[in-house]
Image: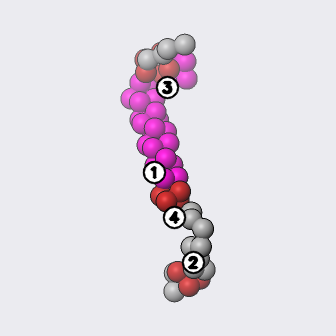
Amino acid sequence: MEMGIKELAKRDKMPEATKAAELLRVALEIYEDQIWDKVAGQRDKRGVKFVSHKKAWA
């Protein structure tokens, strides 16, 4: 089912601009999660030395 912003806003009983902003926020969160997953994957290797949270922020 393909819906545009206008239809989604009507369905959710909100202004189109609010729905557009909400969709952008969600899209940016998903994109950010993908980037952090890539960074974590690059760092997650055998034999890596871990630093404690306390030491890292000291």
| Label number found at residue 43 | 4
Front tag of 3 and 2:
2
Chain-order first, disc 1 or disc 3: 3
**Residues marked 1 and 2 touching at CB (< 8 Å):** no
Spatial separation of the CA atoms under disc 3 and disc 4 = 42 Å
Chain-order first, disc 1 or disc 4: 1
Spatial separation of the CA atoms under disc 1 and disc 3 = 31 Å
Under mark 2, the amino acid is Lys
Residue 55 appears in the picture as rendered: yes
Chain-order first, disc 3 or disc 4: 3
Is 17 magenta? The answer is: yes
Asked which secondary structure carries label 1, the reply is: helix
Asked which secondary structure carries label 2, the reply is: loop
Q: Quadrant of residue 16?
A: top left
Front tag of 3 and 4:
4
Is 30 magenta? The answer is: yes
Asked which secondary structure carries label 3, the reply is: loop
Residue at the image position 53 percent from the left and 22 percent from the top: 13
Q: Quadrant of residue 52?
A: bottom right
The region drawn magenta spans: 10-38
Numbered label tally: 4
**Residues marked 3 and 2 touching at CB (< 8 Å):** no
The residue pinned by badge 3 equals 14
Under mark 4, the amino acid is Arg
On the image, the x and y values in percent for residue 48 come to: 56, 73
Front tag of 1 and 3:
1
The residue pinned by badge 1 equals 35
Q: Nearer the viewer, residue 47 or 34?
A: 47
Front tag of 1 and 2:
2
| Label number found at residue 49 | 2
Spatial separation of the CA atoms under disc 1 and disc 4 = 13 Å
